Image: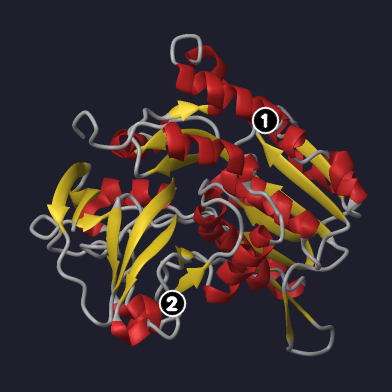
Amino acid sequence: MKTKAVRIYGKEDLRLEEFELPEMKEDEILAKVISDSICMSSYKAAKQGAAHKRVPDDVHEHPTIIGHEFSGVILQVGEKWKDRYRPGQKFSIQPALNYKGSLDAPGYSYRYIGGDATYILIPHEVMEMDCLLPYHGEGFYPASLSEPMSCVIGAFHASYHTRPGSYDHLMGIKEGGRLALLAAAGPMGLAAINYAVLNDRKPDVMVVTDIDDARLARASQLYSPQWAADHGVRLYYVNTRDLEDPEGYLKELAGGAYDDVFVFAPVAPVIEQGDRLLGRDGCLNFFAGPTDPAFSAKLNFYNVHYASTHITGTSGGNNEDMIEALDLFSKGLDPSGLVTHIGGLDAVIDTTLHLPEIPGGKKLIYTQLSMPLTAIDDFKEKGKEDPLFAKLAEITEKHNGLWSVEAEEWLLEHGRKIGEKGM
């Protein structure tokens, strides 16, 4: 079977190509990809090429398919897996396989599996590690967003505190405590706001900071303080850009120092600000992934010794985190607030290479379609000349300006298929 896919050959060398997939083996699964959410990790891989820890050294000779936040439909199941999977099942994939301790992952390391493709061969190790996860909810885009949501869930589970007088670690954010999300008005920060409020273990007060008024306004619109209050959380949004004493203001706002601080930008001053916000037994969670392997920031070791402050960090979630995300989505939790742009497979290269420059949240790709990356907010304007965007604008307006299963289904039926007029 032929597939069209975006493959990486080296630093900033991404190519959209059509090629033949090998014949499926008895321990493999053939699948059709429907959607992929482009992640900053793909940008980092594209910028670093073979220097990236998950990209093979010989990628210039044996290119791999990029994209790791994807969902689709199983088409054929090899004999080995027929008792666990069936054709027609919707799925998502946990890319952090940890197969025999390897860092290899779909979307970075494999020649025939990745999210930015029309068809893929799922190798045996994905199933052996229980990383092919059935999705029972509506639509496909929630399943694509289960991977980034699992990263948030994993981070919340990885934060920890100690029991007074013992060395026991109590996993998770402090229930009923003070939580700060710094530089958190981007897509992953939005996911964290949503999860923190709807999670069983929730804070009493949560403060979200950023230095961009537009991003904070959108976050407040999607997840309002009143919505959080209805779920028992006091929520505040703060632009710290012009504050003379941001730490003092944030502590006063929350009623004291913080039990948990999450940092969503790999910026040393933000990390150091988070460290200064911590109270006794406070946990600093460094969520953002830096591109510089020598990246560092200062930490107050006086407080580490005398106030038991500590630091943690995670890179991705595990299977349980992703299963939790898929379960939340199948029960009606809608992650559409994370999505700001829609595009087709032919938009992947430009979007990936320029991702930090494109404002907004998640860029959602429909791999079976040809479509320029387009902001949902621009649908109406583009609809003046293109009836496809006019209809999408009509549907999204019905859903408070957000992407939806209705919009997805209409686009998949009426959008131009990739390859109809070339690639």
- Residue at the (73%, 37%) spot, across then down: 222
Which labelled disc corresponds to residue 85?
2
- Please report whichever mark, 1 or 2, sits nearer to the chain's N-terminal start: 2
Classify 368 as above or below 177. Answer: above
Quadrant of the rendered image containing residue 105 = bottom left
Residue 104 in sight in this render: yes
Q: Nearer the viewer, mark 1 or mark 2?
A: 2
Disc ID at residue 385? none
**Quarter of the N terminus within the rendering:** bottom left
Are there few (<14), some (14-19), or many (20+) residues within 10 Å of tag 1? few
For residue 101, say whether it is visible.
no
In this view, the residue farthest toward the left is 61
Residue 421: x %, y % from top left: 21, 28
Vertical side of 410 occupied by 81: above or below: below
Render colour scheme = secondary structure
- Residue 11, how many percent across, how many down? 20, 46
What amino acid type should be assigned to the residue bearing mark 1?
Answer: Arg
SS label for mark 1: loop
Image position of 203 (left or right of 47): right
Answer yes or no: do the residues labelled 1 and 2 have beta carbons within 8 Å?
A: no
Q: Position of residue 88 (x, y in %)?
A: 44, 64
Q: How many marks?
A: 2
The picture places residue 180, in percent across and down from the top left corner, at 74, 52
Reading the image, the residue beneath label 1 is 241
Report which quarter residue 201 is drawn in.
Answer: bottom right
Position of residue 30 in the picture relative to residue 39 (left or right) = left
The residue at the far top in this view is 384
Q: Amino acid at mark 2?
A: Tyr
Q: Nearer the viewer, residue 85 or 37?
A: 85
Disc 2 element = loop
How packed mark 2 is, by other alpha carbons closer than 10 Å (few <14, some 14-19, many 20 or more), is: some
